[in-house]
Image (cartoon, rainbow, N blue to C red):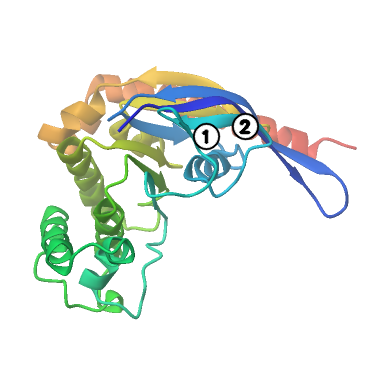
């Protein structure tokens, strides 16, 4: 495991009509090994683009990503991805989904079975290994997605709105699970979310991005993730400091959204 370094990353997309869109501009950030970082910002600020660059799905047009001494030039096992929709293999059982990566890596059957069983227990799905994916609720499917990611033993887990499609109660339970797995595994986690409350709750460090071109607007060091590991999440959300930070960041995001709307409505 190693630190993740984002070094002056920029991303410009070329459109079919010959014009360009500057999605990200000169983003630099160092994420320590084992750190949980949440990334928040208004729609269109480049959050998912940044995550796709971290995953190696996109090559930046400027700058570079490094994991330790290794430059990120494409997808690999060191960085796992959890999507908003589980992206599971519907034709496979839960256990086969979780064990897919180790099977592709040629690991011994006994080792795979033991790892799958341990991970299903970690995410609260013991006894569900033989179930079909379509038999599970949305929250349970996201638990499978988390377990499948962990089965590859990545250094970094990248999460793109992984809880966004869940109902409020299931989302809260899954937030607790993310914190539990973070503390148990010591993995580095970078989580994209549109929820200010979720970003505050799950981020040891919270990065607020500004509108296009996406860039870092503000950064916070927060105590709530560490407290949430051992405390009731609802009690953490009731802390005066949590409410103050939530209101501050909501106002910040709202001002950015108004700026975007103003630009969109301005006469040409």
**Which quarter of the figure is the N terminus placed in?**
top left
Dividing the picture into quadrants, the one containing residue 201 is top left
Q: Nearer the viewer, residue 137 or 261?
A: 137
Depth-wise, is mark 2 or mark 1 nearer the camera? 2
Image-based side of 19 in relation to 215, left or right: right
In-image side of 169 versus 127 (left or right): right
Separation of residues labelled 2 and 1 (CA atoms): 9 Å
**Residue 26 appears left or right of 249:** right
State the SS at label 1: loop
Marks 2,1: beta carbons within 8 A? yes
- Residue drawn at (51%, 27%), measured in percent from left and top? 6
Residue 228 placement (x, y as % from top left): 18, 33
User: Which residue is under mark 2?
Assistant: 214
- Residue 267: x, y in percent? 87, 37
- Determine if residue 172 is in view: yes
Crowding at mark 1 (Cα within 10 Å: few <14, some 14-19, many 20+): many
Number of numbered callouts drawn: 2
Circle number at residue 41: 1
Depicted 102 relative to depicted 72: above or below: below
Give the quarter of the image for residue 115.
bottom left
Q: Is residue 60 above or below residue 238?
A: below
Query: What is the crowding at mark 2: few (fewer than 14 residues within 10 Å), some, or many (at least 20)?
Result: many
**Where is the C terminus found, in terms of image quarters?**
top right
């Amino acid at each position: 495991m190693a630190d993740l370094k984002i070094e002056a990353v920029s991303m410009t997309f070329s459109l079919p009509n010959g014009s360009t869109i500057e999605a990200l501009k000169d983003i630099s950030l160092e994420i320590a090994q084992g750190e949980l970082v949440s990334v928040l910002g208004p729609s269109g600020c480049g959050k998912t683009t940044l995550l796709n660059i971290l995953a190696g799905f996109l090559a930046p047009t400027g700058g570079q990503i490094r994991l330790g001494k290794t430059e990120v030039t494409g997808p690999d096992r060191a960085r796992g991805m959890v999507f908003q929709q589980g992206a599971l293999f519907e034709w496979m059982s839960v256990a086969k989904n979780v064990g897919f990566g180790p099977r592709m890596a040629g690991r011994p059957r006994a080792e795979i079975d033991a790892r799958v069983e341990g991970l299903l227990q970690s995410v609260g799905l013991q006894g569900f290994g033989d179930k079909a994916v379509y038999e599970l609720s949305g929250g349970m499917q996201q638990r499978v997605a988390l377990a499948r990611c962990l089965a590859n033993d990545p250094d970094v887990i990248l999460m793109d709105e992984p809880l966004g499609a869940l109902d409020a109660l299931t989302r809260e339970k899954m937030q607790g699970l993310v914190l539990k797995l973070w503390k148990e595994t010591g993995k580095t986690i970078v989580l994209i979310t549109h929820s200010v409350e979720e970003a505050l709750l799950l981020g040891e460090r919270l990065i607020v991005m500004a509108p296009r071109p996406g860039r870092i607007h503000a950064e916070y060091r927060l105590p709530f993730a560490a407290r949430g590991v051992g405390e009731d999440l609802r009690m953490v959300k009731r802390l005066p400091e949590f409410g103050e930070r939530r209101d501050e960041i909501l106002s910040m995001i709202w001002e950015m959204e108004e700026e975007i709307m103003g630009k969109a409505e301005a006469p040409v």
